[in-house]
Amino acid sequence: MRIFIRGIVFLLVIISLVSCKKTLKPEELPSSISIGATYYTQFVIRYEKGTHLTSNFRRGDSIPVNTPVRLLTISSKAITVELLNPNQKLVVKNVEKHTGDDVYRAFDKLFAKKKINLSKFTPLEKAQIDNGTVAIGMRKEAVIVAIGYPPITETSNLNSNQWIYWSGRFNKFKLHFKDGKVSGIED
C-alpha cells in the first residue's frame, strides 16, 4: 500500500512540474521580443484585476491603443508588462485554445515596436477606437484596433462576414460585415 501511495505522490509531482509555466530566458525568445524593451499596444485591451485573457472578453477597464509598455517577463502561458504611464503591471494570460496562438504570436498581436497609425482611420473609426467600441460603417482593420481579435473558437476566419466576440464568459455579441464594413451589431 505504501509503495502504491508513494507512486501516486511521485506521479502527481511529475505532472505538476510538467504543467508549470516556464519563464523564458532572453536567449530563448524570438529576436523581435526583448525583455525590458518598450512596445505599444496594438488595440484597446480590456482587463480585470490586472489581467487580460487573450480570449478577449469585452469587459473591465481598458488600456488605449498605442499605450507604451515595458516587457517584464514572458513565459509559455503569460506575458507581464508594465504600463509606463501610470506605472501599473498587466498580466496577459494566453488562452491558446481560444486564440490558436502560442505566447509569441499572442505577443505580436498585442504589442509592437511601432504605434498604430491612427491617421488612416475615418473620424467615425477614430472615435470608436478611442472608446474601445464598434459602430456600423467601421472597416475590419478598425474593429481589430478598437476591440481586438475575436476568439477562433467563434470566428475561425477573419475573412468571414460574421465575427463573434464574448462580452463575458456566457455572453456573446456578433458583428456582421458587408463589403468589409460593419453592417450590423447583434447583442
Image (cartoon, rainbow, N blue to C red):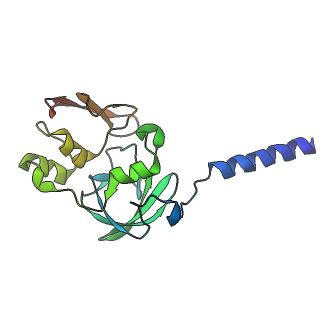
Indicate the position of residue 64 as horizontal and vertical percent values: 24, 58
The picture quadrant where one finds residue 62 is bottom left
Left or right of 119 in this view: 26: right
Residue drawn at (31%, 55%) of the image = 61
Q: Which residue lies furthest to the front in this view?
A: 31
Indicate the position of residue 88 as horizontal and vertical percent values: 37, 68
Residue drawn at (8%, 48%) of the image = 122
Q: As rendered, which of 177 and 158 lies closer to the eye?
A: 158
| Quadrant of the frame with the C terminus | top left
Residue 171 visible in this rendered orientation of the protein: yes
Residue 53 visible in this rendered orientation of the protein: no
Indicate the position of residue 158 as horizontal and vertical percent values: 28, 34
Residue drawn at (26%, 46%) of the image = 147
The picture quadrant where one finds residue 101 is top left
| Quadrant of the frame with the N terminus | top right
The picture quadrant where one finds residue 157 is top left
What is the count of numbered marks? 0
Indicate the position of residue 136 as horizontal and vertical percent values: 12, 36
Left or right of 175 in this view: 29: right
Residue drawn at (88%, 41%) of the image = 4
